[in-house]
Amino acid sequence: MQRWRTAGAQMLLSGHVHEPGVLQPLPGLWACRAGTAVSHRLRHGSPNSLVVLTVEASGTAVGGWARYAARWDYDQAAGEFVCVLRQAVGAL
């Protein structure tokens, strides 16, 4: 991970890992792991999930734009995906 950050990487993306998450393993380097969006073979007690990345205007971010990662989990009772985490992951 240190080499990726040194090379300029700011975010590592992975999917279908059955264990969703948005975390910062090193300062300046984020990791977004999407779970399994539509499979019935769930593991680790994790629900179906996905991560949505957005760039939004922000009056508080340097340059006026900020990046966000939002984790959405499937809520069986509601019958839809719901946002369970929204994390700022840096300015542009």
Image: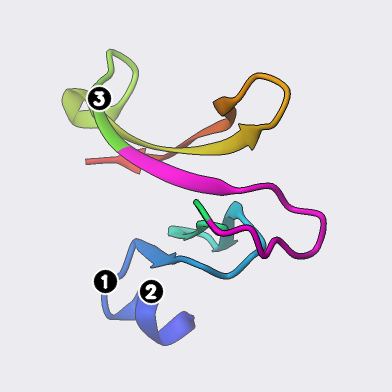
Q: Main secondary structure of the magenta part?
A: loop
Q: Residue at x 70, y 61 (%)?
A: 42
The x and y percentages for residue 88 are: 45, 35
Q: As displayed, is residue 2 above or below residue 8?
A: below
CB atoms at circles 1 and 2 under 8 Å apart?
yes
Magenta range: 39-53
Colour scheme of the picture: rainbow
Q: Picture quarter containing residue 53?
A: top left
Mark 2 or mark 3: name the one nearer the start of the chain: 2
Q: Residue furthest front?
A: 40
Label 3 crowd (10 A; few <14 / some 14-19 / many >=20): some
Identify which amino acid the numbered label 1 is placed on: Gly
Mark number displayed over residue 56: 3
Q: Residue at x 25, y 24 (%)?
A: 56
How far apart in space, not on screen, are marks 2 and 3 (Cα)?
23 Å
Identify which amino acid the numbered label 3 is placed on: Glu
Horizontal relation, residue 48 to residue 29: left or right: right
Q: Picture quarter containing residue 61?
A: top left
The x and y percentages for residue 52 are: 38, 40
Horizontal relation, residue 50 to residue 90: left or right: right
User: Dot 3: what SS?
Assistant: strand
- Residue behind mark 2: 5
Depth order, front residue of 35/57:
35
- Residue behind mark 1: 8
For the C terminus, give its image quadrant: top left
Q: Residue at x 40, y 67 (%)?
A: 12
The verdict on residue 15 being magenta is no
Depth order, front residue of 6/71:
71
Identify which amino acid the numbered label 2 is placed on: Arg
Kindly report which numbered mark, 1 or 3, lies closer to the viewer in this rendering.
Answer: 3
The verdict on residue 45 being magenta is yes
Q: Residue furthest bottom?
A: 3
